[in-house]
Each structure stands twice: as structure tokens, then as C-alpha cells.
């Protein structure tokens, strides 16, 4: 992490776990276990129905509320969808887009990911833009080409002032929910490449300021090593964000790097 130039972000992704009534006890347990934060933004991205509870109980604990998905459309006949202005109206600050699970199970294209990021930016919400290669792509040495394409596609039409509100998450698909973490060196190599792609598009200053997270089986044991890398500015955490003690340990690891 380079805390001089950019914000540290520790974001949980609850996926399809937890009910609204479980939010309060979770946040209370997390609040009791987590250290006082300095220069580290803690976010919990939760299922849409849990957002009001997370906003209510997370406030005291200085936990920002994130959504897990958003519609690319502003309004209208899109049954079941939630528009960015609806999230903004509630007070949601972040929203994940381009998660590999949505790319795979919901066939979300790079164009759709870009449209969702745009919708969020237009409504003052920071997109957490996920990119990452499959195991097959890594084995065929296509990682960097794939990341290059995904980053450029997701940021199409996003200007430098909007980039400041974006967070990029490098999530190798083979490491998500598998218990197989990228080594700190593997994660750093790709995060550094993402920063250099952003430098090519926007220039040195925006590249230096953008927060790039690692995600993929980050846990209480491996967080410190990953977060010590210069181009890894935080984590997007699935499984371990469902355990208050583990999530608190990851936040503490980020806090220690911030001191
Ligand atoms: C994720 O879902 O974004 C993720 C990184 O999950 P996990 O930490 O469980 O691998």
C-alpha cells in the first residue's frame, strides 16, 4: 500500500448470505473486534434487502454500505432491477460491478459492466470494478492481455475526475472462494500492471491516486502479506467478511500498514 497517495479500502462482499435481522448483531460484533480506524475505509457490500439495516447499524461503526449490483438503466420496465439513483437515495456509497460471478452466471459483458459503472458515477456512487483472469487464461499466459482489455472496457468514457471515485479490484477467478490465494507477488504484479494501464489512459497523477484492491481468498492469515505490497491498496473479501473476527483482523492489518 502507498498510503501517502491513495485511500486504503477494505470491502466485504457478502454475496447471497445473511438476512436483514442478522446485520445488527454482526455489526456489533465487528465493531467490538475492529481497531479504531485511521485512513482506512471499511465497506460492507450486502444483498439489496440488507442495505437499510447496514446503513442504520453500520453508521456508528464507521462502516460504509455498498451494494452488490445495480441496473445499467436509469428507470422503467426492468422487473426486479434496482437503479443507481435508488441506491444513492438510500445513502449507498459503493457498488460492486463486473464481479466474476455475475459475469459468469448472468452473462454480464464488458459493455454492461461499463454501463453499470457509468450509471453509478452519474449518481455519485463509487463503482468497485472487478477484473480478473480464469485459470485457463493464466496458464496460457493471457492474464495481462485479458486484464488490459477488461480495465479499458470498464473505464470507457470515464474521465479523470470520475476515475478518482472508482476503485479497481483485481480478482483472479481461480482464487475466488477456492481457498487458493494468489501469492503476494502474483497479486502485486497484476495490480502494478493495472496501475500502468491507468497511467497510459489518464496519466501519472490519476494512476498514483487510484485505489487498487486484491480479492480472492484473502483471509485473516494472508491479509498482512498481501496488503504490504506497494500496489495493493486494500482487499475485496468474500468468505472472510462473513466472520466478524476475521474481517476485523483484516481491517487491523490494513490499519497497521497505515500507521
Ligand atoms: C469475492 O467474492 O469477491 C471474493 C474475493 O471471495 P473470497 O474472498 O471468498 O474468495
Image: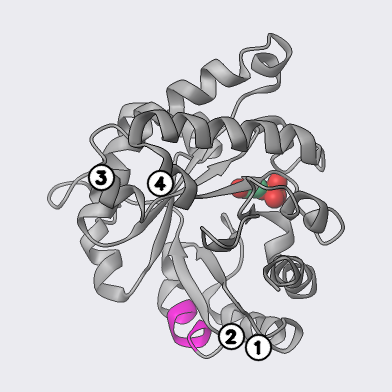
Label pair 4/3, CB-CB below 8 angstroms? no
State the predominant SS element of the stretch in magenta. helix
* Stretch of the chain drawn in magenta: 53-59
Question: Residue 24: which numbered mark, if any?
Answer: 2
Residue that appears at 52% across and 91% down? 60
Most foreground residue, 39 or 58:
39
Which type of secondary structure does the marked residue at label 2 adopt?
A: helix
Residue where numbered disc 1 is placed: 28
Which type of secondary structure does the marked residue at label 1 adopt?
A: helix
Question: Residue 118: which numbered mark, if any?
Answer: 3
Q: CA–CA distance between discs 4 and 3?
A: 22 Å
Q: CA–CA distance between discs 4 and 2?
A: 40 Å
Q: Earlier in the sequence, mark 4 or mark 3?
A: 3
Label pair 1/4, CB-CB below 8 angstroms? no
- Left or right: 68 as drawn, with respect to 79: right
Please provide percent x and percent y for residue 7.
52, 62
Q: CA–CA distance between discs 3 and 2?
A: 32 Å
Amino acid at each position: 500500500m502507498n498510503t501517502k497517495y491513495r485511500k486504503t479500502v477494505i470491502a466485504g462482499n457478502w454475496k447471497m448470505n445473511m438476512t436483514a435481522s442478522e446485520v445488527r448483531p454482526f455489526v456489533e460484533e465487528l465493531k467490538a473486534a475492529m481497531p479504531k480506524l485511521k485512513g482506512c475505509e471499511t465497506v460492507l457490500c450486502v444483498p439489496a434487502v440488507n442495505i437499510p439495516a447496514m446503513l442504520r447499524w453500520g453508521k456508528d461503526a464507521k462502516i460504509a454500505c455498498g451494494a452488490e449490483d445495480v441496473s445499467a438503466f436509469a428507470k422503467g420496465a426492468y422487473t426486479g432491477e434496482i437503479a443507481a439513483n435508488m441506491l444513492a437515495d438510500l445513502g449507498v456509497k459503493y457498488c460492486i460491478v463486473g464481479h466474476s460471478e455475475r459475469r459468469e452466471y448472468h452473462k454480464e459483458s464488458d459493455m454492461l459492466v461499463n454501463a453499470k459503472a457509468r450509471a453509478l458515477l452519474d449518481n455519485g456512487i463509487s463503482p468497485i470494478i472487478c477484473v480478473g483472469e480464469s485459470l485457463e487464461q493464466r496458464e496460457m499466459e493471457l492474464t495481462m492481455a485479458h486484464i488490459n482489455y477488461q480495465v479499458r472496457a470498464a473505464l470507457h468514457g470515464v474521465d479523470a475526475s470520475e476515475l478518482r471515485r472508482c476503485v479497481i479490484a483485481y480478482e483472479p477467478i481461480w482464487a475466488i472462494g477456492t481457498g487458493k490465494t494468489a501469492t503476494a507477488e502474483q497479486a502485486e504484479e497484476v495490480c502494478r500492471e493495472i496501475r500502468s494501464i491507468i497511467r497510459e489512459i489518464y496519466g501519472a497523477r490519476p494512476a498514483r491516486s487510484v485505489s487498487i484492491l486484491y480479492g480472492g481468498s484473502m483471509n485473516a492469515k494472508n491479509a498482512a502479506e498481501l496488503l504490504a505490497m506497494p500496489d495493493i491498496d486494500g482487499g475485496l473479501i468474500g468468505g472472510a467478511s462473513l466472520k466478524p473476527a476475521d474481517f476485523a483482523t483484516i481491517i487491523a492489518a490494513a490499519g497497521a500498514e497505515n500507521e
